[in-house]
């Protein structure tokens, strides 16, 4: 599925493509997705990062802060105008990312925000 269709599918489920904010979270999703990493055959999975609005200015579709990134060597290269992030392959114990064209068909991972369902103690 394309990146746009993947994000739309997540939205129809009241979520967004996954944002990733730490190496631990990145690795968790990698394992969750079945350790997909054969990028030589175009196998990857979409996450919610993009630089649609300004080249090189990445953001997450869920609106969370861009505070972590783990691009692979030479990436992101914006090759032919790539603006959409997929997980790429493990390198030096890091699960790295690459920017891809939106049209590539990859599996994808949605992330639900649970905070709205968590009842808070008074004072929060
Ligand atoms: Ca780009
Ligand atoms: Ca790229």
Image: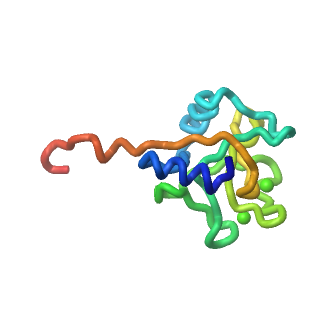
Q: Residue at x 21, y 41 (%)?
A: 119
Q: Position of residue 50 (x, y in %)?
A: 63, 59
Question: Up-down: is 11 above or below 33?
Answer: below
Specify the farthest residue to the left: 122
Q: Residue at x 62, y 56 (%)?
A: 4
Q: Position of residue 67 (x, y in %)?
A: 54, 54
Q: Residue at x 63, y 33 (%)?
A: 30
Question: Up-down: is 73 above or below 63?
Answer: above
Question: Up-down: is 28 above or below 99?
Answer: above
**How many numbered circles does the render carry?**
0
Q: Is residue 74 visible?
A: yes
Q: Residue at x 70, y 43 (%)?
A: 106
Question: Up-down: is 27 above or below 120?
Answer: above
Ligand 2 - quadrant of the structure image: bottom right
Specify the farthest residue to the right: 40
Q: Is residue 30 left or right of residue 104?
A: left
Q: Is residue 96 visible?
A: no
Q: Position of residue 105 (x, y in %)?
A: 73, 46
Q: How is the image coloured?
A: rainbow
Q: Position of residue 33 (x, y in %)?
A: 63, 31
Residue 78 occupies which quadrant of the picture?
bottom right
- 65 and 102: which is toward the camera: 102
């Amino acid at each position: 599925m394309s990146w746009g269709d993947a994000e739309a599918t997540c939205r129809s489920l009241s979520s967004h493509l996954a944002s990733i904010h730490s190496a631990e979270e990145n690795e968790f999703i990698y394992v969750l997705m079945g350790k997909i990493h054969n990028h030589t055959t175009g196998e990857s999975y979409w996450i919610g990062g993009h630089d649609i609005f300004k080249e090189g200015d990445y953001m997450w579709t869920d609106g969370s802060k861009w505070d972590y990134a783990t691009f692979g060597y030479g990436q992101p290269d914006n090759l032919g105008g790539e603006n959409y992030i997929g997980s790429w392959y493990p390198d030096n114990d890091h699960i790295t990312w690459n920017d891809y064209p939106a049209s590539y068909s990859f599996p994808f991972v949605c992330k639900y925000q649970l905070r709205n369902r968590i009842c808070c103690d008074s004072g929060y």
